[in-house]
Image (cartoon, rainbow, N blue to C red):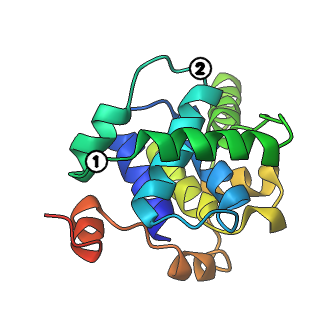
Amino acid sequence: MIVQSLIINFTCDFNLPLGVRSTSLQLYSRIKNEFNLDHIEMCCCCIFIGLKIEDIQEKFIEKFNFYFKRKIDENTLFLVENKVIELLNFNFFFPNPYLAMYAIKHKHDLEKKVYAIKFSFDAAIKNLDRFLCLDLNQYKLIDLISHACGITKADMKLFKETKILKKDELFKLLKIK
């Protein structure tokens, strides 16, 4: 859960598009067992590759160094990037559940449907963040989105395992000052 929390905190703190967050989290779930990297290196690699997949042209290596208060090895990033490309077999399709959820909200707004539970997009994003920290192979995208929009009591069991740590908690855990 540490790497996912790092990804979520970094993408929020730098106000990156939700597509980068989604791609980085999904990428992590695909490659987490393939590389022997520490939490911060894995987070940086996933975001670095996620930025490229989502066509963000900004340089982030200096931002990684500043944010994590340590030097991130550029060679490691590039080496992992090459191996990930091979591992993914050049398949860079990562569905964006945040965008799909926004489309559903927009459709509901247009149809002016009245629901017993008010749809809060911010709350739904937080719920979806938690779901994306789970093993994604066992869930369908539409199930994630529908559950994120209106969580049932049965779904709350999943949240006990998926606490997203705040930046201060993470840095204390990782012994970063």
Q: Where is residue 124 in the image (x, y as percent from the top left)?
A: 54, 50
132 or 177: which is nearer to us? 177
Q: Residue furthest top?
A: 57
Q: Is residue 101 left or right of residue 123?
A: right
Q: Where is residue 156 in the image (x, y as percent from the top left)?
A: 58, 77
- Kindly indicate the quadrant of the structure image that contains residue 98: top right
Q: Position of residue 68 (x, y in %)?
A: 27, 52
Q: Is residue 85 left or right of residue 132?
A: right
Q: Which amino acid does label 2 sit on?
A: Asp
Q: What residue type is labelled 1?
A: Lys
Q: Which of marks 2 and 1 is nearer the N terminus?
A: 2
97 or 16: which is nearer to us? 16
Residue at 62 percent of width and 77 percent of height: 158
Q: Which residue lies furthest to the front in this view?
A: 75
Quarter of the figure with the C terminus: bottom left
Q: Residue furthest left?
A: 177
Compared to residue 17, the image places residue 74 above or below, namely: below
Q: Is residue 79 visible?
A: yes
Q: In this view, does 8 lie to the left or right of 173?
A: right
Compared to residue 7, the image places residue 14 above or below, namely: above
| Label of residue 71 in the image | 1
Decide: few, some or many residues near mark 2? Use Cα within 10 Å; few <14, some 14-19, many ≥20.
few
Alpha-carbon span between mark 2 and mark 1: 24 Å
Q: Is residue 43 left or right of residue 156?
A: left
Query: SS of the residue at dot 1?
Result: loop
Q: Do the residues labelled 2 and 1 touch (CB within 8 Å)?
A: no
Residue at 29 percent of width and 35 percent of height: 63
The residue identified by callout 2 is: 55
